[in-house]
Image (cartoon, rainbow, N blue to C red):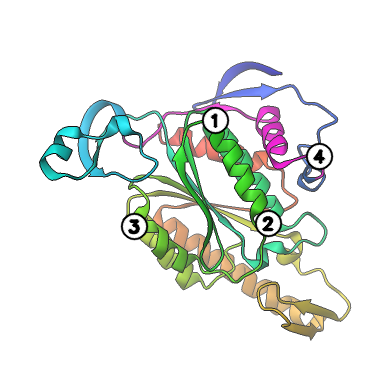
Amino acid sequence: MVGSAHPTSGVEYSMAKRNDSVPIDDPTALAKFGRLEVVAKLLVEGCIIGQHKSPFKGASVEFVEHRKYYPGDEIRHIDWRAYGKTGRYYIKEFEDETNLRCYLFVDCSGSMAYGESTLSKFDYARQLTAALGYLLLAQQDGVGLVAFDTKVRERFEPGTNPQKFQQLTTALERCKPGAETSLGEVISQTLPTIPRRSLIFIISDCFDKVEALTAALNRMRHARHEVILLQVVAPEEETFPFRSPTQFRSLERSGHRVLVDPHRLRKIYVEQYQEFCAELQKQCTGLGIDRLKMTTADPYQKVLGAFLDSRSRLR
């Protein structure tokens, strides 16, 4: 049951009464609670429902420019006069749109299958993506999906129809992590077909070369997209807590195993991991990209609240 809304940091939040039987603060326990669509609704309705004003162009005040029509665009925005002159479909863009056009890029590569003390990174990312989709649709924002590893595995274009939520959860439940990661290649495939000034979420462990990842993010920003990077890691990947000799198996390369002594490797691993995260943050800051790193033990409301706060700063 949703209570009365009250303004916080420029965003109106509706706080639901907490149901003690629903473990919304524990992602691992929540994963066992029910189907993906049920979990997403529990998260959003049990934590936060916000309202925002979009910084993107829309259809309410002043005409700005034309752009090419893409599948998923609303037909009512087609400029039929331009079509009569050129024989091609163009969309009219305006200032002060109240709705976002959002793409949820979800990493389903093999490394996302890792999970030791918690649910896997992929299961965490999948629940987070479903919750974001439900939240966006509740605000009348358009939601689309791009699930990828070395290539696009699942995709559909943004729309505001409530049926998009069912489409989102069904597609996410079909995804199985397995291959290597190639975000740069996926961006090259998809970017030409994504309308400019979209909001793009990237949900990934970001375990790729920083140079390749930065190049991909730079291409997104060059195309005038707003980008939010949600880096999902396991607690063990941050602290490397292993003590006895341990065999590590690659989740992306079949049959690739290595036996290591954690005592000798821990210091080097932690230093390199911290350097990687620091460099990634530096590059994101330089590109004007919001990056939020979370472990699979972190409550989802941390991410949902941060997103709503970031939207309010752009009002």
Q: Secondary structure at mark 3?
A: helix
Q: Which mark is residue 122?
A: 2
Q: Secondary structure at mark 1?
A: loop
Residue at 62% from the left image edge and 65% from the top image edge: 109
Q: Residues within 10 Å of mark 4 (few under 14, many from 20)?
A: some
Q: CA distance from mark 4 to mark 2?
A: 17 Å
For marks 4 and 1, the one nearer the N-term is: 4
Amino acid type assigned to the residue bearing label 4 in the image: Phe
Q: Which residues are drawn in magenta?
A: 32-58
**In which quarter of the view is residue 251 placed?**
bottom right
Q: Residues within 10 Å of mark 2 (few under 14, many from 20)?
A: many
Q: Estimate the x, y position of residue 193 in percent, counting from the top left.
A: 36, 54
For marks 2 and 3, the one nearer the N-term is: 2
Q: Which residue is mark 4?
A: 33
Of tags 2 and 3, the one toward the viewer is 3
**Residue 221 in the image: above or below residue 4:** below
Q: Estimate the x, y position of residue 1 in percent, counting from the top left.
A: 71, 18
Q: Secondary structure at mark 2?
A: helix
